Each structure stands twice: as structure tokens, then as C-alpha cells.
Image (cartoon, rainbow, N blue to C red):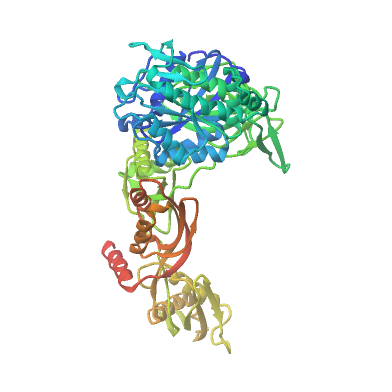
């Protein structure tokens, strides 16, 4: 393993690189590392060898599917870069990156502008309150339009967005940028591998645009400080150093979001971006305190990114690698991580040893003696630590705030392709969940299926591919069954009589039972109304047990019958042949006799669905809910969007997340909660019953 350098806290920047899928994040990270000298060669996504594109599934699909840390260096400052997926199926990775970053670069394509993924990651950054800047990528592509994209950013995301550089040319004619802080033009040298440039005056045809944006930049920065404003109004020029300091303060207050531009392919604008990340983003000690709890003491601690603080680090990503095993990526929020040190995992109540502490660079790991406060590292082979766990000093256990991963809303049933696969599937699914907390899987005994849940169909498909590649387990998938229920709609009564004579002692049980419907959700009730000892008291509980066991198997389609009362009011017994088992069988027979005449119906699970959608898609959303037999319960208007609350049968929600994304270009999302059970329309119920009989 190669050796890496140590960096002090003030020389560290932690930056999440975010954006919509295909906007150029991975190529940007690759270019930043190459120009900064930490990557030995310049990679390419299309050719499958970009620095942070490490998984075979990513190379196969040509998209990022997991967060991958790397780093660049500029003027002695280490810039930790966390590359993230842009597709909604892998949004948990972006959330994890934002949790451990102190700032973000949001990448926007110069040809596509703001897209749904851009809006989503912008919201994540707003919720965390971290400083951010935009990088308009792919300025060398056909139809690139910086001003159009900038106006898109201002309209949809940030009115406070402000260019700090403007392009010279666009598309194949893109050849430089004008730095609004210095007033100088960077004209890039053809064929320069690392984006070297010559300085020049502002081109004559761009002087008006330069004056327009420089004036707005100066005015905006002047308003951040009274002294600067007074000097500006008196006609005094704000120096570059003063402008940068004012910009950093304004970014921290969320008053200004700078906009930069360039081309990762040509490596144009990369040096300027590196410089601005160092100058404008905070180091970890400047990013505020971080809350942690002290287990068992009901106390909160506020941690600062200082070396002399108590050690606390959050594991934000777990991965497995052939011949290495499990890798745990972590950020040090306080204290120092020293190679070989002992650490305590308070959440798991276990001890760990941090061997071979390293800094990650794509698929490489560079071992270091220690990581200072605020840095990002990776260790292998921790025994009992997973994503979201906190590692802390053994003498002062701490638990940092966890990453709030989204709940998976797309389900599929799976089974092993062979008996051997079936034997290994449980362990493989658990390992996949450890690597990706947004992937869940468990065996549902009622349905008799293993149900896997993810954030989208692609997410689930990729997990199946990983299971085959990493753990040699192949699976077949199918639609999950629905956990229907049955109930009765009217009162009926009847007899259950069990008599068996086999030459020795016989079996005899006889009971009369009345079944009555109960309100939805009230469950089961048993009433003992035996008088005169016609059934001895010791046998009545057996009648109850027989009814409950029979109700568990239903009367129509094998689903549990719920929400009814059973009254045992008469019967008879034999002094020798009666027994608990005989009355249990009699109770079961009585249930089957009576329930079939009590108007049995099929109940279906009803899901409370909340759909948050831009207003322009409201008509499509409402029409689709109606087609799914849903009932709209209410609408909550927002700023340009509406949350629709509806009750929809679960059977109608299979692949709903995919349909919703298709209807709204991925801009709507939904949550679902079980609301209860309701009688199914007779014709729908008949289809279910016939399908189950055919399956049997």
C-alpha cells in the first residue's frame, strides 16, 4: 500500500460533488485530481477508467452508483472530493456525502441546465446549510449556453447565484474564462494536459458583459459589510483579497452562491475551481460545531474539529473489496485518528482497532500515520462496525447524528435460482444492506417470499448483479404477493361436532358457536356464554383455540379472517371421551360451518400515499390515482408544488415509483404508510381468489 501525506485541519476542505446524472461530476473529480497532481493519469468515463468509477456495474452502465472519495491538492491544501451518483435510485449515497461534507460543488451541464437531480441535491445542501458553488460543466459541447444555464439556476434554485467568471466562447469555440475578481482573461493553451493558460486583457466583444457582471459582483459583495459599502459608494475599488473574504462570509450566510464554468474533458477552468474551493470554502474548524450524544448519560456534546478534542468519527460508507474484505470510510469530526489506535463503537457496544489508517483515492488507499481533525479516511476489517456507526475514544463514548437515509419504496420478491443459492441468499442480502442502507430485504413468513426493497428498479437490478458478482448468488424475481385478509359481514351460528371411535378411548367434542362482525381494526373477541355446565369450563378455551387456528387459514382464499366475535353458547360433552383436542377440533369445525354462511369477504390493504409534485403535473397525478382505485383525501399547496394525500389499494401500487417518475420527469416523489384494510370490490376479489386457486 502506498504512503500518503498528513494534512493539518486548516489545510483540509471537504467537498461533496453533486448534480444530476450525466452532468459530468465524475469527469470533474477526475480532472481536479489530475490537475492537482494526486491522480497519475487523466481518466475517462466512456472508456471505464475514471478515477472514482470503480465498481464493474458502474463501468457497465456508464454511470456512478455509489459515493467514492478521492482528493486533490492545491497550494498545500488537501481537497477531499466525494463523487456521488446523480440518479434518484442511488440518492442515499448523495445524502451520505452531504452529511460529512463542509461544502458542495453542484455540477450543472451547460447543455441541459437544471434537472430534477440538481433540484434534489440542492435541497439536501439547503437542509444541511453548507456553503456551495455551481460549476457549469461541458462548456466545450455543442449547444453549450452559459447565460441560459445561469438564468435557469437563478429561476429554479438560487436567486442569489452570481457568476465569478464568464466563458470566452462556447461549444467547440470555448477557449477561456474571464476572472471577475482579477479582471483578467485566462486563455487556455491548446494541447495542455493540465489546463495551463496565458493571461490576457478582456476581449473587446465581451467588455460589456464583463462590466455588467463585475458591477453586480462588486455591488453584492459591498452590501455584506458596512465599511465595504461606504468605500464602494465613494468610488473606491474593492481589492481581490477583500472581495474573496466578503464572498466567503456571504456564502457562509447563504447570501451568495458563486457560479464558475469550464470543461473537464479539455481541463479548462479546473485550476480556477481548485483555487476557489481553497479560497472560499471553510476548513473543518470553520464549519461550526457538531452534535453528539453521550450514551447512558442523557447528555449532548458539541464537538469542534480540533486535534485536542475527544476522538469521534462517523462511518458514512461501507464497501467490500476482493482480497481485502470490508472497508469502512469515515470522517473525523473531532480529535485525531492514529494508526493502530483502539476505538469504541458505542452504538454496538464493541471495541475496534484502527489498523492501516489510509486516505482514499478512488480504488487506491494511501496509508498515513494519523488523520487530523476534519479529515476523511478508510480502514479495513473492522469487526462490528457498519455505516452510521460512530467510533470514539474508549474513555469517552460518543454517538454522532446519523445519516437520515430515505426509506425504500420499490419492492420485488426474490428466490434463489437453485437450492444452493437459496442456502446462501440470507447472508448475501445482509451484506448488501451493510454496504447500502437504502436496500432492505427480509423473509415474510405470511407471504412465503423474500421481499427486497430499494429506491427504484435500477437500484434493485444492480443489487442483484452485485449479489452474483460478489457472493456468487443468483436469484429470480417476481411480483410480491399481497397480504390480504378476510372478514364476515353478518351474524350466523351453527354447530361443530367431533366424534371419533377407534376401539379404545374415543374422542368427543360438541359446541355451538355464533360469529358476528366487529368494526374494522377491532380484531378478535371470544365470548364464553356457556350455562349450566353443558361444556365443562376446562374445555371452553380449547374451543377458542380451535376457532382462532381455523380463522388463521381463512374461508375464501386462505388469508386470516379478522375483526369478528365468536360466542360459544351451547354444546355437550362425554365424561370419558371428551378432551382438549376434541373440543379444539369441534371449535375449528364450527368456525368453518358458520363463517361460510356469515357473508365472508376479502379485505385488501389500503395504503396512505402522499405524493409531492410540481403543480404542472397535478392533473396527471390525480387521474392516475383514480385509475388505481384511489381516493384523494386532501391536498396541501406549497411553493409551486402540492402534496396530494390519497388512499390507494396496495395491489394497485406495484411499480408506482417508476410510473410516478415517468409521469413527472422524476420531479415528484411519494411516501406510503399502511392505513388499514377495506373490503375489496366483489369482481376484484373474485380475480384474486381464482388466481390463487390456479396457483395452488
Q: Answer left or right for 246 relative to 63.
A: right
Locate residue 221, reporting x and y percent: 58, 28
Res. 315 visible in picture: yes
Q: Does 130 sit above or below residue 582?
A: above
Q: Residue at x 44, y 85 (%)?
A: 493
Closer-to-camera residue (310/595): 310
Locate residue 609, reporting x and y percent: 45, 58
Q: Residue furthest left?
A: 694
Closer-to-camera residue (223/79): 223
For residue 5, what is the image quadrant?
top right
Closer-to-camera residue (68/602): 68
Q: Residue furthest bottom?
A: 532
Locate residue 291, reporting x and y percent: 66, 37
Q: Residue at x 52, y 29 (%)?
A: 216
Q: Residue at x 56, y 81 (%)?
A: 528
Locate residue 455, reporting x and y percent: 41, 45
Q: Answer left or right for 1 relative to 457.
A: right
Amino acid at each position: 500500500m502506498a504512503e500518503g501525506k498528513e494534512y493539518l485541519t486548516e489545510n483540509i476542505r471537504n467537498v461533496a460533488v453533486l448534480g444530476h446524472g450525466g452532468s459530468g461530476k465524475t469527469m470533474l473529480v477526475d480532472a481536479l485530481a489530475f490537475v492537482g497532481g494526486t491522480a497519475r493519469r487523466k481518466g475517462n468515463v466512456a472508456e471505464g477508467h475514471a478515477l472514482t468509477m470503480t465498481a464493474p456495474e458502474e463501468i457497465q452502465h456508464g454511470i456512478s452508483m455509489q459515493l467514492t472519495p478521492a482528493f486533490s491538492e492545491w497550494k498545500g491544501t488537501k481537497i477531499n472530493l466525494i463523487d456521488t451518483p446523480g440518479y434518484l435510485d442511488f440518492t442515499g449515497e448523495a445524502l451520505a456525502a452531504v452529511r460529512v461534507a463542509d461544502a458542495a460543488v453542484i455540477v450543472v451541464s451547460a447543455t441541459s441546465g437544471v434537472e430534477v437531480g440538481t433540484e434534489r441535491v440542492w435541497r439536501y445542501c439547503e437542509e444541511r446549510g453548507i456553503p456551495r458553488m455551481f460549476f457549469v460543466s461541458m462548456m466545450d459541447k455543442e449547444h453549450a449556453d452559459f447565460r441560459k444555464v445561469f438564468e435557469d439556476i437563478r429561476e429554479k434554485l438560487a436567486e442569489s447565484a452570481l457568476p465569478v467568471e464568464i466563458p470566452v466562447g462556447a461549444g467547440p469555440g470555448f477557449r477561456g474564462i474571464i476572472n471577475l475578481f482579477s479582471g483578467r482573461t485566462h486563455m487556455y493553451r491548446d494541447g495542455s494536459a493540465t489546463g495551463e493558460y496565458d493571461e490576457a486583457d478582456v476581449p473587446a466583444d465581451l467588455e460589456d458583459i464583463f462590466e455588467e457582471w463585475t458591477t453586480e459582483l462588486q455591488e453584492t459583495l459591498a452590501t455584506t459589510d458596512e465599511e465595504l459599502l461606504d468605500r464602494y459608494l465613494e468610488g473606491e475599488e474593492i481589492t481581490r483579497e477583500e472581495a474573496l473574504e466578503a464572498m466567503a462570509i456571504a456564502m457562509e450566510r447563504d447570501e451568495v452562491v458563486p457560479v464558475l464554468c469550464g470543461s473537464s474533458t479539455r481541463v479548462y477552468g479546473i485550476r480556477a475551481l481548485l483555487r476557489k474551493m481553497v479560497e472560499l470554502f471553510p476548513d473543518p474548524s470553520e464549519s461550526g460545531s457538531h452534535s453528539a450524544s453521550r450514551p447512558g448519560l442523557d447528555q449532548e456534546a458539541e464537538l469542534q474539529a480540533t486535534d485536542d478534542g475527544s476522538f469521534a468519527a462517523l462511518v458514512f460508507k461501507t464497501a467490500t473489496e476482493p482480497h481485502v474484505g470490508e472497508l469502512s470510510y469515515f470522517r473525523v469530526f473531532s480529535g485525531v485518528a492514529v494508526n493502530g489506535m483502539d476505538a469504541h463503537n458505542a452504538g454496538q457496544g464493541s471495541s475496534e482497532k484502527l489498523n492501516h489508517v489510509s486516505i482514499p483515492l478512488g480504488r487506491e488507499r494511501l496509508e498515513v500515520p494519523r488523520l487530523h481533525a476534519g479529515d476523511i479516511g478508510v480502514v479495513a476489517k473492522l469487526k462490528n462496525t457498519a455505516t452510521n456507526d460512530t467510533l470514539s475514544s474508549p474513555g469517552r463514548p460518543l454517538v454522532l447524528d446519523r445519516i437520515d437515509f430515505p426509506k425504500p419504496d420499490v419492492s420485488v420478491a426474490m428466490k434463489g435460482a437453485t437450492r444452493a443459492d437459496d442456502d446462501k441468499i440470507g447472508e448475501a442480502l445482509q451484506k448488501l444492506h451493510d454496504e447500502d442502507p437504502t436496500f432492505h430485504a427480509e423473509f415474510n413468513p405470511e407471504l412465503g417470499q423474500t421481499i427486497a426493497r430499494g429506491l427504484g428498479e435500477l437500484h434493485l437490478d444492480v443489487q442483484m448483479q452485485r449479489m452474483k458478482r460478489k457472493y456468487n448468488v443468483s436469484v429470480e424475481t417476481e411480483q410480491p404477493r399481497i397480504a390480504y385478509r378476510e372478514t364476515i359481514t353478518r351474524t350466523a351460528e351453527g354447530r361443530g361436532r367431533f366424534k371419533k371411535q377407534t376401539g379404545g378411548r374415543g374422542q368427543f367434542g360438541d359446541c355451538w358457536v355464533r360469529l358476528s362482525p366487529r368494526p374494522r381494526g377491532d380484531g378478535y373477541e371470544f365470548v364464553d356464554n356457556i350455562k349450566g355446565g353443558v361444556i365443562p369450563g376446562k374445555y371452553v378455551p380449547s374451543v377458542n383455540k380451535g376457532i382462532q387456528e381455523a380463522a388463521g387459514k381463512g374461508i375464501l382464499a386462505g388469508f386470516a379472517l379478522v375483526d369478528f366475535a365468536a360466542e360459544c353458547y351451547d354444546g355437550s360433552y362425554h365424561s370419558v371421551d371428551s378432551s382438549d383436542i376434541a373440543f379444539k377440533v369441534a371449535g375449528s369445525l364450527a368456525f368453518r360451518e358458520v363463517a361460510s354462511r356469515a357473508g365472508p369477504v376479502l379485505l385488501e390493504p389500503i395504503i396512505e400515499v402522499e405524493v409531492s409534485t410540481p403543480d404542472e403535473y397535478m392533473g396527471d397525478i390525480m387521474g392516475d390515482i383514480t385509475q388505481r382505485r384511489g381516493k384523494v383525501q386532501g391536498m396541501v399547496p406549497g411553493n409551486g408544488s402540492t402534496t396530494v394525500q390519497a388512499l390507494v389499494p396496495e395491489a394497485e401500487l406495484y411499480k408506482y415509483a417508476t410510473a410516478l417518475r415517468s409521469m413527472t420527469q422524476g420531479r415528484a416523489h411519494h411516501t406510503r404508510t399502511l392505513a388499514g384494510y377495506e373490503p375489496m370490490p366483489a369482481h376484484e376479489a373474485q380475480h384474486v381468489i381464482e388466481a390463487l386457486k390456479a396457483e395452488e
